[in-house]
Image: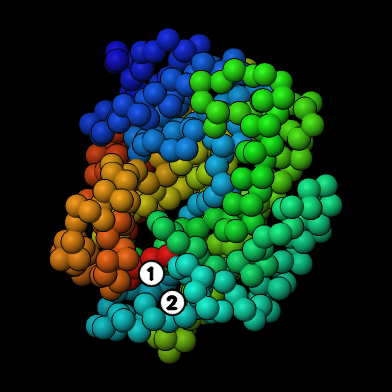
Amino acid sequence: MCQEANFQIIEHEGKAPIKAWVQGVPFEEQAQQQLNNIAELDFIHSHIAVMPDVHMGKGATIGSVIPSVNAVIPAAVGVDLGCGMVATKTSLKAHQLPDNLSGIRHAFEAAVPHGRTKGRDRGAWHNIPELVGLQWQELKPRFDAITAKHPKIAKSNHINHLGTMGTGNHFLELCLDEEDNVWIMLHSGSRGVGNRIGNYFIELAKKDAERNNVHLPDKDLAYLKEGSDYFDDYVEAVEWAQDYARKNREVMMANAINAFRRELGFDFVTDEMAVNCHHNYISREHHFGLDCYVTRKGAVRAEKGELGIIPGSMGARSYIVRGLGNPESFNSCSHGAGRVMSRTKAKKLFTIEDQIAATEGVECRKDAGVIDEIPQAYKDIDKVMEAQSDLVEVVATLKQIVCVKG
């Protein structure tokens, strides 16, 4: 590696340069190899930008920004299409909260279906609430147009997942900032229907590569070229899934706020500051003289003045940030802390006692089912923030006091 500006140039034999904001944070060899593979593709525009939360993903590296001209890589976008964050600042102060926060946690858990679907009421809606039905009616015409061309996508959880959290690192939290203001923050994406769309077009791209005898450094880098049979349909479906994901977060936030009000027994305001941003998506943008598709896989758009959210791990700080509009990163920043070990390794390495100690002061689950989300399985969020000080400025620092995990 050689140092240049606030990023490092990653030396490799591929065609496109790799610029990485990884000073002071772990950068695994497998992730670097994945980036090298992407850099070999001839439609990459200018360079690849690597965020400080970088870690190995499926095909493409999580924490990477991939600009492409006339082509997209479905597996690089992934299957949690439109996954992202929403945060709302309330008019409440910490002293207005009850000493025992378990009631708030249980109110959140009841208002937002989460976790794996076991029985009729967990993870998905059985009886569709009115708000969900109304939001689905806005999404349905475009979905019907997509599924008319690709009927297999219709066989998915769509309306019954709208307004639900999912599993893994998805969460709903109550947080305090430095001035003891109360925030509500959550993390989720396009759920079952996004997964269906992502996997469906990943397979079509792989079949297209086989049919055209395209040689790839990794089969998961199969791409769709503009003008090919499925390119326009894929972009249409992904953009719809991203809109679904945004609405999904809006519905969850509305339900969480209402549940919070009922639990407290008095009203509060939530319109002072709200942020809703994707961190797993494609966007049509203009960079370095060309129109291109920007794939942010575990990265947030950080144009100058634009607000974003960078969450820490369970028990660590999170940040509301304002973009500095750094063109070298394609106006991007990290989407979180980034894992330093797999879920399997975390479960083997840590105990319930470790989880209890790491989440002291947070009202949350403290059992074997969430050990894989222990803070020690993630990079140090403070070092991640330091590595990208030229990409964003901190607006507010949040510390969770209630956490509901998927």
In the visual, does 221 lie left or right of 28? right
Instruction: Please provide percent x and percent y for residue 372.
Output: 30, 56
Of 26 and 330, nearer the camera is 26
Based on the displayed image, in which of its 4 quarters is residue 8 positioned? top left
Q: Is residue 267 left or right of residue 282?
A: left
Quadrant for the C terminus in the image: bottom left
Q: Which is more toward the observer, 218 or 250? A: 218
Are the two marked residues, 2 and 1, in contact with CB atoms closer than 8 angstroms?
yes
Q: Is 371 in front, or is 401?
A: 371
Q: Which residue is mark 2?
A: 109
SS category of the residue bearing label 1 = strand
Image point 52% across, 78% down: which residue?
119
The amino acid pointed to by label 1 is Val
Question: Which residue: 64% across, 19% down?
Answer: 214
Residue 132 placement (x, y as % from top left): 66, 72
Q: Amino acid at mark 2?
A: Glu
Depicted 347 relative to depicted 286: above or below = below
Tell me the residue that label 1 is attached to: 404
